[in-house]
Image: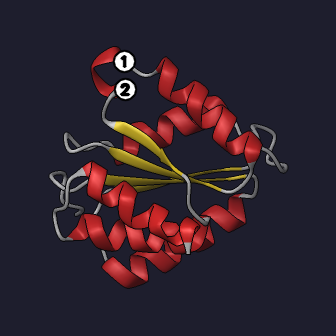
Amino acid sequence: MPSRSNVGIVIVSHSRKVAEGAADMVRQMVGDSVPLATAGGNADGGLGTDVASIMTAIDHAWSESGVAILVDLGGAETNSEMAVEMMPEERRDRIVICNAPIVEGAVMAATEASGGSPLAVVRATAEELASA
């Protein structure tokens, strides 16, 4: 069972298979040490993203330490921003969208989170990849 004290990770992709594949890689790297959830594809099972499924993924990966979201393309980021805005007010400040490559960022964020790092450090670790 994932530690609910560690930052949770949500992977949002236009493709369900990409989201699940990235999550599989995270699980192989850090096991169940972080809460992890995915939201991939649109509500009809095609390519796209869905605000409701992103909100469900955030709830599933929720930790009092917060949730870091990794996204693949612009629409995933836009819908993730909408999902965050629709979350209960007391949670919004503990949810961040990382500007990082989705697979590498998710692995690095989860690795950092598995050590108990706070949300800001988890985000910074994932985003270091974007500036490299």
Q: Is residue 29 visible?
A: yes
Dot 1 amino acid type: Pro
**Looking at the rendered structure, which numbered label has been put on residue 2?**
none
**Contact between labelled residues 2 and 1, with CB atoms less than 8 Å apart:** yes
Q: Which residue is mark 2?
A: 92
User: Quarter-wise, where is residue 2 in the image?
Assistant: bottom left
Dot 2 amino acid type: Arg
User: Quarter-wise, where is residue 121 in the image?
Assistant: bottom left
Residue at 50% over, 67% down: 105
Local SS, label 2: helix
Quadrant (top left/top right/bottom left/bottom right) for the C terminus: bottom right
* 26 displayed left or right of 93: right
Image position, residue 111 (x, y; %): 32, 74
* 5 displayed left or right of 99: left
Q: Nearer the viewer, mark 1 or mark 2?
A: 2
Furthest residue toward bottom: 28
Quadrant (top left/top right/bottom left/bottom right) for the N terminus: bottom left
Q: Which residue is mark 1?
A: 88
Image position, residue 80 (x, y; %): 59, 36
Furthest residue toward right: 46
Q: Is residue 33 visible?
A: no
Q: Give the CA separation, mark 1 to mark 2.
A: 7 Å
Q: Is residue 13 above or below residue 30?
A: above
Residue at 60% over, 64% down: 102
Local SS, label 1: loop
Image position, residue 122 (x, y; %): 32, 59
Q: Label 1 neighbourhood size at 10 Å, few (<14), some (14-19), many (20+)?
A: few
Residue at 83% over, 50% down: 47
Residue at 75% over, 52% down: 14
Q: Is residue 18 above or below residue 8?
A: below
* 84 displayed left or right of 113: right
* 48 displayed left or right of 37: right
